[in-house]
């Protein structure tokens, strides 16, 4: 009896946990731009100056500054990362002012050094505080900024200005005052000018960490040689259309899953019911994984998910067909189940691994949509093994070992099909 | 025969006679498959594939509208926008699909939306996808490369777990499956885009899955069987196929239901994916049941004959 009690306890508790947490999980799942509107753009970076080169640092820095711009525009969780040697992929979902955002993203990085001359006393923003532009990005020597260390081993940034006289004049005029560094109208740092620089070089020091100093160096170099971004690929979906896709696909998935569950129940009876329960657990567990790994769910992702359910069902079908065969050969129910589970495991592993190989190749080679699809397929396969092999066998084991369900009819096997041993 | 062997052999020897002689039927299926493949080759070489923007370059515009628009009026509108390259227009009750050869710039995109909303439907909702020629080419090579590498990976795995003959038969079966789907898309001029490649790769996964399950049974039966003649081998293959038949059909049925529901009720944006999946699943079931195992048998028999021949000469 103990096992049966454990069985019901597990079923009831996990059903409760699932019912309780699912609404929250569904709300937390990150939807891709094809489901809630947004855009994806693949930029190719090109130096504004024909002789320039796209360096790795410049690309990374550009991606970072794009992300900061996107955040400043109030977009939620933009995905921006460099790809290959000269590309940047931008994905922004759930925005209303798409045109504005796209326009702003395209602009090259804008580096300025500003002073407080002419600024109002009651300035609220950094820009109001430092209104006068003293130096622009193109005043700096290309790739002239370097990371150096002071005698106290503090990181600092050495900069080089093209026009020595101009820099001398500025440093004379602003001696003892702040010279603020801005990127895209955003204040990065406002060091104080502590000398007159006559040879066009200066050192920016402060209590920077090495990371901060490196970032500052890259920013200044990027400002001196900004990258021009060309749209190579773009996909934009408006929110209403995305919502429509989401609803349609959700309904389709629910109908599909409903039919599958019904089929399993009718065809496989008791084990079929267990399979239905583990399939629901499978869906729940996958949602949990999506949330924990912060995976963005896209349309192809949902497709991978639904097909994953097919794979999960297959694991059950292979096992139950094997068990049925054993039953027909006249073995007892418990030993049929054991033998069926054992022999079918190898088949399941082999078939899952081959599918996994295909998915892994896609993940390694693909970009964008393909990569997302492959990732979800891989997660699905692993989760399916857990719920529909391990969990479902465990549940069946609990029941059968306590003598529950020892009837051929429960397995969809007819008495007359059984041969004598 | 030892008692252990006898017990294991019972697996199929005691079963009632298998109902269908798959091996005997296979020559018809081989012929059928060869004809289908030849047809596919002809169609593909004449018409090629109807590439979507992902593999060509250009822009695709999908608009959800609240009233039905005629093809002619949309066509006129497109011409009025001043695009120079070819374009196609399809309309249905709530959707307009436009494929442009031109690569839309962001400004053109904004203008298109604005003009469209002003002219037809202020509530129109857009999905616009633009692909540059360089990226299109890259996506295409990438897709082909993925299929090639995935196939090699599967061959290696199956060769290690089974034997090379199984691997060859499995790969031929899965290539055949994907080729049928590609041919169908070519015949009906259906659009081939990135999701189509995803579908093909998923089908490959499923098809190999199906095939492996049957091969697994052949391998298991082989272990206990005493094979003396070609007829023994034929019997074994027939038994293996019929033993796994219910499983093959049930699995394909469930996945088919899932794909078919996506096709019927799912979003337009993945319609081609669902369609390719649905066709592919049926083809996959066909090839894994009727082509893969008989093909393995052909390879195996050849080896056997060679063996006997070399024995005879020594």
Image: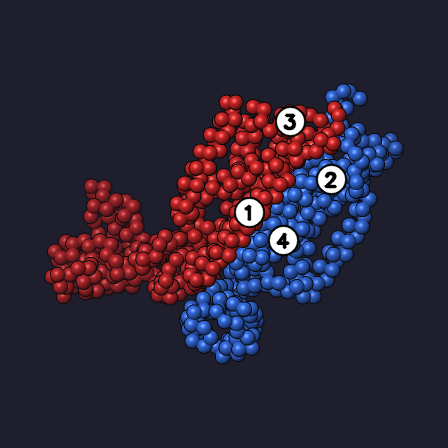
Mark 4 touches mark 3? (CB < 8 Å): no
Q: Which quarter shows the C terminus of chain B?
A: top right
Image vertical order of residue B130 relative to residue B19, above or below? below
Mark in the foreground, 4 or 3: 3
> Can marks 2 and 1 be said to lie on one chain?
no
Q: Which of the numbered marks, if any, corresponds to residue B278?
A: 4
Q: Is residue B58 above or below residue B152?
A: below
Asked if marks 4 and 1 fall on the same chain, the answer is no
- Write down the residue under mark 2: B241
Disc 3 packing (10 Å; few <14; some 14–19; many ≥20): many
Spatial separation of the CA atoms under disc 2 and disc 3: 25 Å
Image point 64% across, 52% down: which residue? B280
Kindly indicate the quadrant of the structure image that contains residue A91: bottom left
Query: The chain drawn red is chain what?
Result: A
Q: Position of residue A185 (x, y in %)?
A: 26, 61
Quadrant housing the N terminus of chain B: top right
Q: Which chain is rendered blue in the image?
A: B
Q: Within 10 angstroms of label 4, few (less than 14), some, or many (20 or more) residues? A: many
Provide residue A306's location: percent of width, then percent of height: 54, 48
Circle 4: element type: helix
Which chain letter matches label 4? B
B89 relative to A421 in the view: left or right: left
Residue for badge 3: A333
Residue at numbered disc 1: A257
Is residue B163 in sight in this rendering? Answer: no
> Which of the two discs, 2 and 4, labels the residue nearer the N terminus?
2
């Amino acid at each position: 009896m103990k096992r049966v009690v454990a069985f019901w306890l597990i079923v009831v508790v996990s059903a409760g946990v699932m019912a309780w947490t699912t609404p929250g999980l569904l709300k937390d799942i990150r939807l891709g731009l094809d489901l809630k509107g947004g855009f994806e753009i693949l930029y190719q970076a090109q130096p504004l100056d024909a002789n320039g080169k796209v360096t790795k640092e410049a690309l990374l820095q550009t991606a970072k500054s794009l992300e900061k711009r996107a955040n400043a525009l109030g977009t939620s969780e933009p995905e921006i990362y460099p790809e290959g040697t000269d590309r940047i992929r931008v994905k922004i979902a759930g925005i209303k002012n798409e045109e504005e955002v796209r326009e702003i993203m395209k602009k090259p990085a804008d580096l300025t050094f500003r002073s407080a001359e002419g600024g109002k006393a009651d300035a609220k923003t950094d820009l109001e505080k430092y209104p006068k532009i003293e130096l622009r990005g193109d005043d700096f020597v290309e790739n002239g900024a370097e990371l150096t260390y002071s005698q106290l081993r503090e990181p600092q940034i050495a900069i080089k200005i093209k026009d020595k006289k101009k820099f001398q004049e500025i440093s004379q005029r602003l001696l003892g005052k702040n010279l603020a560094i801005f990127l895209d109208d955003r204040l990065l740092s406002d060091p104080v000018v502590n000398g007159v620089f006559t040879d066009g070089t200066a050192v920016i020091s402060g209590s920077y960490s090495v990371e901060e100093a490196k970032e500052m160096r890259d920013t200044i170099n990027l400002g001196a040689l900004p990258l021009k971004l060309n749209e190579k690929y773009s996909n934009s979906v408006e929110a209403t259309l995305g919502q429509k896709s989401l609803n349609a696909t959700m309904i389709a998935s629910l109908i599909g899953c409903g039919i599958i569950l019904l089929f399993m129940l009718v065809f496989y009876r008791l084990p079929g019911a267990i399979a239905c329960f583990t399939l629901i657990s499978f869906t729940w567990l996958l949602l949990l994984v999506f949330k924990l790994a912060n995976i963005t769910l896209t349309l192809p992702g949902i497709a991978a998910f639904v097909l994953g359910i097919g794979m999960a069902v297959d694991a059950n079908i292979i096992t139950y067909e094997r068990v049925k065969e054993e039953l027909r050969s006249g073995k007892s129910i418990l030993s049929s189940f054991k033998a069926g589970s054992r022999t079918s495991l190898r088949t399941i592993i082999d078939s899952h691994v081959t599918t996994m190989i295909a998915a892994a190749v896609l993940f390694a080679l693909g970009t964008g949509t393909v990569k997302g699809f492959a990732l979800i397929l891989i997660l699905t396969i692993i989760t399916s093994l857990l719920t529909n092999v391990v969990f479902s066998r465990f549940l069946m084991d609990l029941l059968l070992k306590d003598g529950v369900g020892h009837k051929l009819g429960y397995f969809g096997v007819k008495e007359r099909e059984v041969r004598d041993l | 025969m030892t008692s252990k062997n006898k017990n294991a052999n019972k697996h199929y020897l005691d079963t009632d006679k298998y109902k269908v002689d798959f091996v005997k039927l296979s020559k018809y299926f081989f012929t059928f498959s060869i004809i289908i493949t030849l047809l596919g080759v002809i169609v593909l070489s004449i018409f090629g594939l109807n590439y979507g923007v992902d593999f060509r370059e250009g822009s695709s515009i999908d608009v959800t509208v609240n009233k039905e628009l005629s093809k002619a009026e949309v066509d006129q509108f497109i011409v009025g926008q001043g695009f120079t390259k070819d374009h196609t227009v399809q309309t249905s009750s709530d959707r307009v699909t436009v494929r442009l050869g031109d690569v839309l710039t962001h400004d053109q995109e904004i203008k298109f939306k604005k003009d469209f909303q002003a002219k037809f439907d202020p509530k129109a909702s857009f999905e616009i996808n633009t692909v540059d020629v360089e990226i299109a080419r890259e996506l295409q090579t990438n897709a082909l490369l993925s299929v090639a590498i995935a196939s090699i990976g599967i061959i290696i795995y199956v060769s290690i777990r089974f034997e090379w003959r199984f691997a060859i038969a499995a790969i031929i079966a899965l290539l055949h499956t994907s080729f049928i789907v590609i041919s169908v898309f070519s015949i009906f001029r259906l659009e081939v885009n990135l999701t189509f490649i995803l579908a093909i790769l998923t089908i490959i996964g499923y098809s190999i899955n199906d095939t492996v399950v049957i091969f697994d049974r052949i391998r298991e039966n082989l272990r206990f069987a005493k094979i003396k003649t070609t007829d023994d081998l034929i019997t074994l293959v027939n038994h293996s196929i019929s033993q796994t038949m219910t499983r093959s059909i049930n699995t394909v049925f469930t996945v088919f239901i899932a794909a078919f529901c996506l096709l019927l009720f799912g979003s337009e944006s993945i319609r081609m994916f669902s369609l390719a999946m649905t066709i592919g699943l049926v083809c996959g079931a066909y090839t894994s049941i009727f082509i893969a195992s008989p093909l393995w048998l052909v390879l195996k028999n050849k080896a056997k004959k060679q063996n006997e021949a070399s024995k005879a000469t020594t």
